[in-house]
Image (spheres, rainbow, N blue to C red):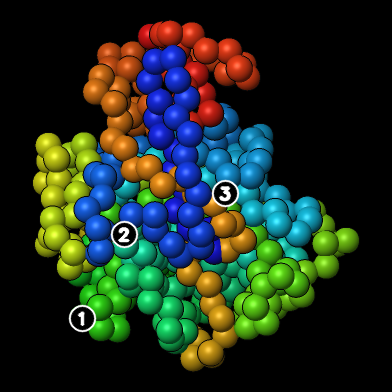
Amino acid sequence: MVSSVRRCVAVAAALLSCQATAQTYSSCNPLSATCSADTALGMSIDVDFTQGEVNSFTASGTPTYGSDGATFTVRQSGDAPQLTSVFYIMFGRVEFSMKAAPGAGIVSSFVLQSDDLDEIDWEWLGADSTEVQSNYFGKGITSSYNRGQFHEMENNQDDFVTYVLDWTSDRIVWEVAGTVVRTLEASDAESNQYPQTPMQVKFGVWSGGDSSNAQGTIEWARGPTDYSQGPFSMSVKSLQVTDYSTGSSYRYGDTSGSWTSIQSDGGSVNGNLGNAGTLTTTAVASGSTSTSTANVPAGIGGSSSSSSDSSSLPEGWVMTSEGKIVPSGAASLRPVYPVICIFTLFATFAGGRMFWP
């Protein structure tokens, strides 16, 4: 699965380079070190990917954009395109419209993941278009694989379906097309496994059935993958994210990994909680619990690189409700795509787009 991918928001004449980390690995794990603050969303954004990329998400691989929104394609071994938010949410709601990728061994993933490796997952196996898997992990502990559940649904590969993750300190709700398919109460989670620290939003596609993976992963993904049957594409048309906390950044107050230790700069944890509990549901369904010992990956599989920086937005910069990072007071700026190797003192490069103050 894909581990943390972060890119710095660079100001003035330089582009900041970012280091790489491996799957389910944090370059600075707050459980064992003092780390930089995480950029907070602290509000709601509504992104329409049919209008193109936004600089509040950074790309790994080569997602493309069109009438289906952001499209992620696996053509050969090693392909694992994804988008990762530069921001974090501290509890919140994520709603998105998505079409999963087909193909035996192909895995479409939508993940919330924190620096201390708490995680909440949606995963779609390309070998079966009539189910989706929910899962959760805490503190990077993957020694047991009995937390995943499979949920029956309609065709998820030919049609766009709306999914919701609603996450609070008390419970997590997974919802498909208005039907709640799973609710996890914090009190029912395995010991020290309830996700409760600031999360990035990540989504993309990868090949769990690739021959380079562990046999347990290949079997879980219902592989092996036959690349001659590809390419295999997943698309996300739109995305709405609401942070249930407020402020400009989140810090770990100690090494406990408890949500009560998280500090908000300029705001408060659960300061926007009034937007919680408003799920519009039409039904409730139960899933089948997986008790297999299959090597289910944590995060989005297939990528071994990510950015290690977690800088807050520079002073004087804001994120708009459409998910674009712009100078304060200039929310309607027109983006200019960057030209490689051209740098200007007053140009700002952020997540693949250049803006001119």
| Residue 245 appears in view | no
294 displayed left or right of 346: right
In this figure, which residue is indicated by the disc labeled 3? 82
From the top left corner, tell me how far across and down residue 219 is, in percent.
67, 82
Q: From what the image shows, is residue 181 above or below residue 31?
A: below
In this figure, which residue is indicated by the disc labeled 1? 187
From the top left corner, tell me how far across and down residue 189 is, in percent.
28, 81
Q: CA distance from mark 1 to mark 2?
A: 25 Å
Q: From what the image shows, is residue 346 above or below residue 304?
A: above
* Label 1 or label 2, whichever comes before in sequence order: 2
Q: CA distance from mark 3 to mark 2?
A: 22 Å
Q: Residues within 10 Å of mark 1 (few under 14, many from 20)?
A: few
Q: Residue at x 11, y 46 (%)?
A: 268
User: Which structural element holds mark 1?
Assistant: helix
Along the line of sight, the residue nearer the viewer: 213 or 321:
213
Which image quarter: residue 7? top left
Q: Residue at x 41, y 47 (%)?
A: 308
Q: From what the image shows, is residue 176 above or below residue 220?
A: above
Q: Nearer the viewer, mark 1 or mark 3?
A: 3
71 displayed left or right of 90: right
| Residue 63 appears in view | yes
Residue lying farthest to the right in this orientation: 228
